[in-house]
């Protein structure tokens, strides 16, 4: 009991433990905030990566593989699989506003892709963007004349009947101009358009979007041997733009109707031709695709899903010896380089800030050594009345434990208040002091990412407390080693 009373007395009457607790609190808060922001960034990258590729993919080379519809039927029978879709990947060019841009063209079935990846939610422009645009482009309501007001109401009623996301799902251009030939729609990554710009709020302006703009899509078919065939060219109209959350994808990818891309790449069903004579053989070449994307049922572990898909694909290819090699990959496998780099950055930053936090241990050690010197006579009295060396050590170790608990608790509270309100803090600093920590015009995420991981936070708090005890260990040992007679004579 006397040990607890002495610890509480030392905590109440000295400023030294306050400085030590402050050091622990600041170091704890610093590490938690850094690891939470980096964890939030990594989590957003993972979600974006999974949204783009589903959970598991079955893929071949650019030439593709046949009998994919039969493989889709087989995969849909697997108990662990919830949804699947076929898509075609190719590389080509678009000519948009006289800018020739290299792109990755992906032929998709939007509805089935949506069941696998939530594709519809990545479509950026909505009807509200159109309504906001006409509101900003016309004079205020009190300054509009009768003709302008009538035009405003007419456009508003027309735009209210348009759902840009629905048009993106059907590849339908929003507006058909008079005497314009019907053209297929295409969906661009939001950064493919060189004129798209983000404002200070991280949002894009529909006035500079490529909605309803015409472009030329050029794809290059290939033979199975990898030789290039005559390019296929189509005029298309932008139906919408998408934002996945990964800049590298949004700056290079376009989505187009599956059947159209299949025809342009000559991967649709066709009459087989003898390569030597050029004459039809009378047999049909089956249609091909380059990838199948899958989503597992809720609760199915990713590794179990991958194994189930691999088993099905192995059985399917064994029954068809002529099929090319099919790769089975999870979303983690496909984005391992990108995600691995971010994970390493998170670990490196955490390590660096943890090293900086060693200062707290040194500070606690110095403060406690000063306290031991100051309390030398007290230690002598305790030893004279029968306190053991271990008992004296336990007083100062308990003192360090108390300082660590208080500092870690305050640091945890400080870090939680910052992490959960980090975007409000960012907005306040920007509006009040014109100071921007996270500029949405530079960073691709329009908000500061953060993730308060309870496991990581618990480890940090426990390490902070143990560090405080570690800092008090040497002074406590020295206190226990003091000679009681010399301690009583100490001035």
Image (cartoon, rainbow, N blue to C red):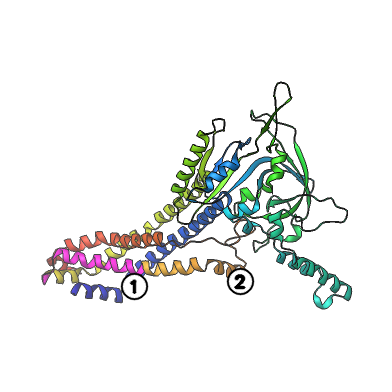
Q: Is residue 352 left or right of residue 263?
A: left
Q: Quadrant of the C terminus?
A: bottom left
Badge 1: how crowded within 10 Å, few (<14), some, or many (20+)?
few
**Is residue 19 at least partly visible in the picture?**
no
- The residue under the point 71% across, 63% down is 163
When asked about the image quadrant of residue 392, the answer is bottom left
Q: Nearer the viewer, residue 412 or 97?
A: 97
Please check the rendered image and state whether residue 399 is part of the magenta-colored stretch, yes or no.
yes
- The residue under the point 20% across, 68% down is 376
Q: Is residue 249 left or right of residue 50?
A: right
Query: Where residue 321 appears, x then y in whole percent?
Result: 54, 30
- Could you say which disc has been placed on residue 432 in the image? 2
Where is 452 relative to 53, above or below? below
Q: Secondary structure at mark 1?
A: loop
Query: Where residue 385 appears, x then y in whole percent?
Result: 11, 72
Q: Secondary structure at mark 2?
A: helix
Please check the rendered image and state whether residue 256 is part of the magenta-colored stretch, yes or no.
no
Query: Where residue 169 appears, x then y in whole percent?
Result: 68, 55
- Could you say which disc has been placed on residue 15 in the image? 1
- Could you say which disc has been placed on residue 83 in the image? none
Between the residue at mark 1 and the residue at mark 2, the CA separation in whole angstroms equals 35 Å
- Which is in the foreground here, disc 1 or disc 2? 2
Tell me how many marks there are. Answer: 2
Query: Where residue 17 appears, x then y in whole percent?
Result: 32, 70
Dominant SS in magenta = helix
* Mark sitting earlier along the chain (1/2): 1
Q: Quadrant of the N terminus?
A: bottom left
Q: Nearer the viewer, residue 239 or 39?
A: 239
**Is residue 309 at least partly visible in the picture?**
yes
Where is 143 relative to 37, above or below? below
Badge 2: how crowded within 10 Å, few (<14), some, or many (20+)?
few
Residues drawn in magenta = 384-407
């Amino acid at each position: 009991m006397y040990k607890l009373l002495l610890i509480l007395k030392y905590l109440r009457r000295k400023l030294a433990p306050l400085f030590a607790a402050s050091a622990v609190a600041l170091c704890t808060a610093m590490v938690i905030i850094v690891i939470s922001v980096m964890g939030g960034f990594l989590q957003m990258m993972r979600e974006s990566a999974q949204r783009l590729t589903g959970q598991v993919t079955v893929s071949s080379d650019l030439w593709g593989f046949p009998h994919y519809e039969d493989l889709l039927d087989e995969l849909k029978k697997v108990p662990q699989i919830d949804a699947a879709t076929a898509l075609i990947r190719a590389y080509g060019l678009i000519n948009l506003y006289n800018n020739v841009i290299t792109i990755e063209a992906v032929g998709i079935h939007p509805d089935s892709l949506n069941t696998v990846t939530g594709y519809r939610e990545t479509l950026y422009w909505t009807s509200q963007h159109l309504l906001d645009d006409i509101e900003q482009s016309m004079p205020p309501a009190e300054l509009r004349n009768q003709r302008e007001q009538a035009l405003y109401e007419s456009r508003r009623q027309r735009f209210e009947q348009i759902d840009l996301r629905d048009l993106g799902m059907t590849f339908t251009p929003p507006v058909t101009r008079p005497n314009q030939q019907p053209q297929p729609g295409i969906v661009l990554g939001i950064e493919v358009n060189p004129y798209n710009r983000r404002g200070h709020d991280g949002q894009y302006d529909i006035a500079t979007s490529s909605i309803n703009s015409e472009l030329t899509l050029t794809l290059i078919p290939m033979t199975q041997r990898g030789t290039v065939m005559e390019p296929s060219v189509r005029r298309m109209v932008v139906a919408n733009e998408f934002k996945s959350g990964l800049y590298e994808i949004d700056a290079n990818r376009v989505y187009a109707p599956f059947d159209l891309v299949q025809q342009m790449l000559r991967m649709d069903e066709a009459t087989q031709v003898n390569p030597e004579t050029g004459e039809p053989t009378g047999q049909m070449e089956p249609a091909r695709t380059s990838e199948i994307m899958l989503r597992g049922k809720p609760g199915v572990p990713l590794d179990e899903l991958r194994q189930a898909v691999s088993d099905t694909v192995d059985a399917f290819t064994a029954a068809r010896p002529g099929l090319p090699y099919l790769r089975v990959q999870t979303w983690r496998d496909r984005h391992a380089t990108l995600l691995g780099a971010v994970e390493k950055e998170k670990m490196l930053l955490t390590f660096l800030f943890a090293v900086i936090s060693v200062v707290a241990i040194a500070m606690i050690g110095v403060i406690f050594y000063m306290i031991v010197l100051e309390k030398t006579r007290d230690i002598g009295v305790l030893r004279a009345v029968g306190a053991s060396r271990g008992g004296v050590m336990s007083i100062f170790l308990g003192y360090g434990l108390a300082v660590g608990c208080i500092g870690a608790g305050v640091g945890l509270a400080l870090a939680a208040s910052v992490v959960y309100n980090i975007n409000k803090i960012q907005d306040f600093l920007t509006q009040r002091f014109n100071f921007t920590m996270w500029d949405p015009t530079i960073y691709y995420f329009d908000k500061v990412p953060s993730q308060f991981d309870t496991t990581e936070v618990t480890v940090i708090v426990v390490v902070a407390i143990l560090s405080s005890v570690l800092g008090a260990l040497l002074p406590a040992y020295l206190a226990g080693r003091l000679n009681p007679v010399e301690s009583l004579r100490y001035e």
